[in-house]
Amino acid sequence: MVELNSSQNRAQSRQYLGRRNWLVILCWLILFLYLSYVFSLFELTTERFLIGLDNGAKFLSRMIPPNFARHELLIEGLVESLQIGIIATTAGVLLSLPLGFLAARNLMPIWVTWFARGIIVLCRSFHPVIVAILFVKAVGFGALAGVLALIVASIGFIAKLFAEAVEEISLKQIEAVRSTGASFTNIILIGVIPQVMGRFIGFASYQLDSNLRNSTMVGLVGAGGIGGTLFAAFQRFDYDFVAAILLSIVAIIMVGEGINNVVRRIYR
Amino acid sequence: MIDVCSNFEERKWSRFTPKERIIRFIFYVAILSSIIVSIRTIEVIPEFLYDAPEQMADMLNRMWPPDLRYYPESIHEALLETIHIATLGTLLAVIFAIPVGVLVAENITPYRWLNWLARLVLVSSRSINSLVWALLFVAVFGPGPLAGVFAIAFRSIGFIGKLFGEALEESHRGPIEALQATGATKLSIMSMGYWPQVLPTFWSVLLFRWDINIRESAVLGLVGAGGIGVSLSTALELFYWDRVCMVLISMLVVVAAVEFVVTQIRKRII
């Protein structure tokens, strides 16, 4: 009986494995077909790839050594990028706080959450560069358009995560505060905020990081920061200056990441 | 009894040590001063601000109604190209990211300098934006979707590699030790010990990145790297705001559809 059972099991598992293998092979086949289709669509041939590699080598040789001669321009652009990142994060965080509360399903009536969630989804669905294009049209070239675009991006990210954090809080503490006869403001301040503050600081520092990265790029469409300088250098084929700009951006992001780690240690 | 009570009242309770309080205070001052300095020194041209509402209204007026004929004319094909760029870029990124992720995981690669090298690769991949990568690859491969694929791939390596490496570092020692005890080779330990443990993370990171890449590849066309961005920039340069609106609407639909697909796959498989 025992033997029969085990042989049955073995047969079953073999059948299962067979079906799984078949599925895996099918997946690989689909992947292969898709790849060959796309490769033919994009006209990706080895010849073109080799030409590209050749171009790449030339390109790299013109980038090295990086040229820091125009460091005034470089520093000016970087400072503006930093300003954009800091202001956008601050304003984005301040706006996300109320919006996140409004979007939390456990605190607010359902129609309010739908409204707030609609705004958040709208903020999230477009790439910051596209938002920046629209703001450049509205407020003209310059850093302000970049700031506004990144505020929109920050709201889409922080408010969503913040709403999720608020939805996960323990309701016992709120009940306790409420039973003392506290007003709604007090419930929020004493019952909710302390529970979510730590995570909120985490989101904010992450967003600062991501805004710093993005602020180096909104300049491509004329919204201020180092991106404009970078784009101009590209169009003038000043590849050594491009390399200098890219290295500085990487350096700044790395410093930012280091600061982020320190902040996280302070607030652990 | 009374003594104990009075002692109890005299003791001061505080959440942080003085050192912690000082550090926090310095931190707050630094944040506040950086915000104030940024606001006071940023260059904003006030003349542009006055007519901002007017300009905004003008833009919205020109956008409505969207030009529906632009969709079959140019958008449809460009949208498909965008999706192909994102998918192919993600696949290419995975091929590069897995070895880098293995190198960055300290429990698998015991060499410090290799860890640091891999970390440097990941950080530079992440801190250079996909648009900048696109600029670089347009210079290498010429304008077209191929540059877009490489831009998306190089931007994604950092993201996938970092999360993959972290998943490897967090995997349990138990199965690995069991395999080592049987005298398994390094390759078998990787494929039988680590790989099954990180598989769910791997899939979810992949899906997440694909979702992001669809959004990102939509703007690559602005610098000539193919996809829907090309239609967008053509419309923008000619000030056809109704066409711009149509592009934006179709992007919104695609992004929503992709998000729906990703959540469905996540629910079913992971």
Image (tube, rainbow, N blue to C red):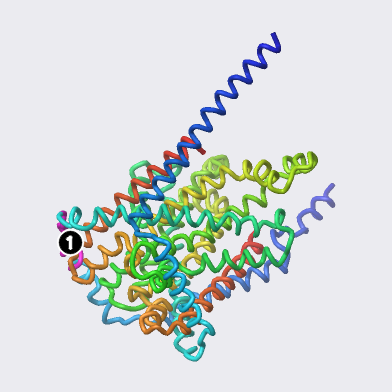
Residue at coordinates 57% horizontally, 28% vertically from top-left? A17
Residue at coordinates 26% horizontally, 67% vertically from top-left? B233
Q: Is residue A73 above or below residue A175?
A: below
Image coords of residue A237 (percent x, y): 39, 83
Residue B120 occupies quadrant: bottom right
In this picture, residue B269 sits left or right of residue B23 = left
Q: Is residue B114 above or below residue B105?
A: below
Range covered by the magenta-colored residues: B58-68
In this picture, residue A106 sits left or right of residue B67 = right
- The answer to if B183 sits in the magenta stretch is no
Q: Which residue is mark 1?
A: B242
10 Å crowding of disc 1: few (<14), some (14-19), many (20+): many
Instruction: For residue B172, say whether it is visible.
Output: yes
- Dot 1 lies on which element? helix
Image coords of residue A244 (percent x, y): 50, 82
In this picture, residue B47 sits left or right of residue A110 = left
Residue at coordinates 84% horizontally, 52% vertically from top-left? B3
Q: Camera-side residue: A53 or A237?
A: A53
Q: Camera-side residue: A116 or B143?
A: B143
Instruction: For residue B37, say whether it is visible.
Output: no
Q: Is residue A12 above or below residue B239?
A: above
In this picture, residue A59 sits left or right of residue A9 = left
Residue at far front of view: A47
Residue A107 occupies quadrant: top left
Image coords of residue B153 (percent x, y): 47, 60
Image coords of residue A134 (percent x, y): 28, 67
Residue at coordinates 80% horizontally, 50% vertically from top-left? B5
Q: Is residue A192 above or below residue A237?
A: above
The amino acid on which the numbered mark 1 sits, given as a three-letter code, is Asp
